[in-house]
Image (cartoon, rainbow, N blue to C red):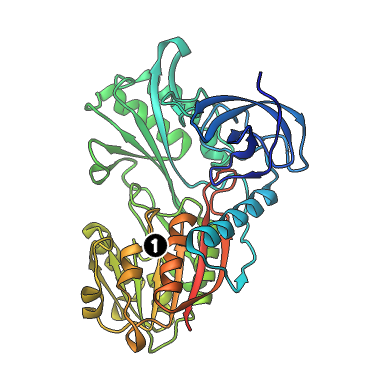
Amino acid sequence: MISPVIVESLDQEGRGVAHSEGKVIFIEGALPGELVTYSPYRKKPSFELAQVNKVLKTGSLRVNPRCNYFGICGGCSLQHMDDRAQVAAKQRVLESDLKHIGKVESEIILPAVYGSAWGYRYRARMSVRYVAKKGGVLVGFHEKRSSFVADMQSCEVMPPRISALIGPLRELIGSISLRERLPQVEVSLGEAVDVLVLRIMDPLTDQDKSLLKAFADKHTVQFFLQTKGPETAYPFYPIGSPELNYTLPEFGIVMPFHPTEFTQVNPAMNRILVRRALSLLGPLKGDRIADLFCGLGNFTLPIARSGARVMGYEGSSNMVRRAGENAERNQLSGNTNFSEKNLFEIDAAWLQGEGVFNKLLLDPPRDGAFAVVNSLGEGDSAPTRIVYVSCNPATLSRDAGVLVHAKGYQLKAVGVVNMFPHTSHIESIALFEKS
């Protein structure tokens, strides 16, 4: 019989961490300070992965989840934890990773950035499955640790108007000929239009088209159809919808985007993130700044608004083209330039060939920016200030170790930006300066 354990902390995936008989036990659904029983679903010699069975002693951090599908749907893992406590736990994970992976400590811990904990998600990719035993079509996120689609009618982290469409979407897709050939609905919301991208494996019939158009008119959405990869998505109905964009009003930026292009899922927090990044970077007229992993220009264009000269680098030729279009749209093409480059394969010679940058902004994907930080030069040729926006504290910590121990930088400040409430995802921002 498995004995109850006391949960000591949370890991990076939002699981409770406990110890029993020399093993580390990672327990989904358990919180620090709680006494729980658990059921293992994966056993290894030194650790076990488990699901909480019963909470024998409830901790002070526990709250009642708002979502009816919490524990079934795999989209959120922390709704049972107080909002502020979630952010504090993420800050501890970030600090722990910096200390143990990078062997660095920050001079300043920045105040965590909060936003609304509900209805924040403006980007989502929902799976679609026709399941006869469930009475028809399911639309939603995968169940925890499963490829099955959760049987859900709402989602608390999406805006209420979109959450309310899950049931009608189930009915709509169940009524068309492609109900078993439509595996995905991608949600992409802008300032003035809500776009739903349907991934279709076969052509629509005339009856299908009529049903989609009626749905779009009734619920005030625009449908895009995607026949293959993301680049194949095109507007279906209504054709005359407003432009899909987000704005950064503080910098006078309007950012058009295609519904399958990467943008931050939480536009309110993105505005705060951009503000904090520029506050730390301190761009000035006369600066020559590199924005690596620039995407559509989310940071490049606000930096350019300061009068600095900004070079944006991105691995996708399409994103480079789109970033250039956005610069032109915002009348910033005169002090911006965008280039395609695989930033995971660069070296010191390439970076040196791009000229001297006195400041640098990094916003890499989860893999981090190891090649970039290893390619930085020494002395006067190296940037004096680096702002690093991270979506993975482990790779940030690895890269921070290189910057501090090999490249002569100091970690001046670091903090969490709660871009994804109720999930274990940790977004953070760090400032490095030359010693």
Q: Position of residue 257 (x, y in %)?
A: 35, 55
Q: Position of residue 159 (x, y in %)?
A: 55, 43
Q: Which residue is mark 1?
A: 255
Q: Is residue 286 above or below residue 246?
A: below
Q: Is residue 152 left or right of residue 1?
A: left
Q: Is residue 393 above or below residue 29?
A: below
| Camera-nearest residue between 435 and 346 | 435
Can I make out residue 385 in this image?
yes
Residue 79, quarter of the rendered image: top right
- In the image, what residue type sits under mark 1? Met
Q: Position of residue 106 (x, y in %)?
A: 57, 70
Q: Is residue 274 left or right of residue 197?
A: right
The residue that appears at 48% across and 31% down in the rendered structure is: 44
Q: Is residue 316 above or below residue 337?
A: above
| Camera-nearest residue between 173 and 279 | 279
Q: Is residue 209 left or right of residue 393?
A: left
At numbered mark 1, what does the secondary structure look like: helix, strand or loop?
strand
| Camera-nearest residue between 237 and 427 | 427
